[in-house]
Image (tube, rainbow, N blue to C red):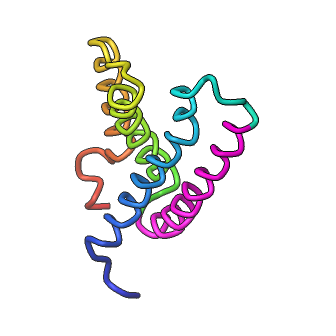
Amino acid sequence: MPALSLSNYLVPVLLLLASNVFMTFAWYGHLKYKSAPLFMAIVVSWGIAFFEYSLMVPANRMGSGVYSVVQLKTIQEVITLVVFAGFSAWYLGQPLKWNHYAAFALIVGAAFLMFYDGPGAAAH
């Protein structure tokens, strides 16, 4: 079995990050153009989502070699929140408030628990 390198862990995360940028634009980018016909928003969103899937599927395939499925989903959700927070403030002009940051901190704490095996777990 080949040795795992840093890239085995990093590449899936980078692909998830890139896919989430596309996903966020596909799901929420049209909100900046509410006067555009809904059908056009749907078609454009589907076109953007193609690129999201083109990155998400390989990220999950590669990532499943080094992360559990639960860990992959947790990574994806944390990335989604980070990307969405930036997108909301930068693109939609809706900055986050203190309670949003507090909620995100709690989610990051939950994500930590998904990766935490407890003391001495590596010895088993």
Q: Residue at x 71, y 30 (%)?
A: 37
4 horizontally vs 31: left or right: left
Above or below for 118 versus 123: above
Q: Which residue is drawn at 28% across and 76% down?
A: 5
72 horizontally vs 51: left or right: left
110 horizontally vs 26: left or right: left
Q: Which residue is drawn at 26% across and 61% down?
A: 123
Magenta part, dominant SS: helix
Q: Most extreme residue toward the bottom, as rendered?
A: 1
Question: Can you give x and y, in whole percent of width and height, for residue 115 in the image?
Answer: 35, 47
Above or below for 3 versus 75: below
Question: Can you give x and y, in whole percent of width and height, for residue 34 in the image?
Answer: 60, 23
Above or below for 66 versus 69: below
Instruction: Count the numbered circles shown.
Output: 0
Question: Can you give x and y, in whole percent of width and height, for residue 42 in the image?
Answer: 70, 39
Point out the stretch of residues depicted in magenta: 40-66
Magenta run includes residue 63: yes
Q: Most extreme residue toward the right, as rendered?
A: 39
Quadrant housing the C terminus: bottom left
30 horizontally vs 80: left or right: right
Magenta run includes residue 95: no
Q: Residue at x 57, y 32 (%)?
A: 30
Q: State the residue in front, 124 or 103.
A: 103
Above or below for 69 versus 44: below
Q: State the residue in front, 19 or 32.
A: 32
Question: Can you give x and y, in whole percent of width and height, for residue 43 in the image?
Answer: 71, 45
Quadrant housing the N terminus: bottom left
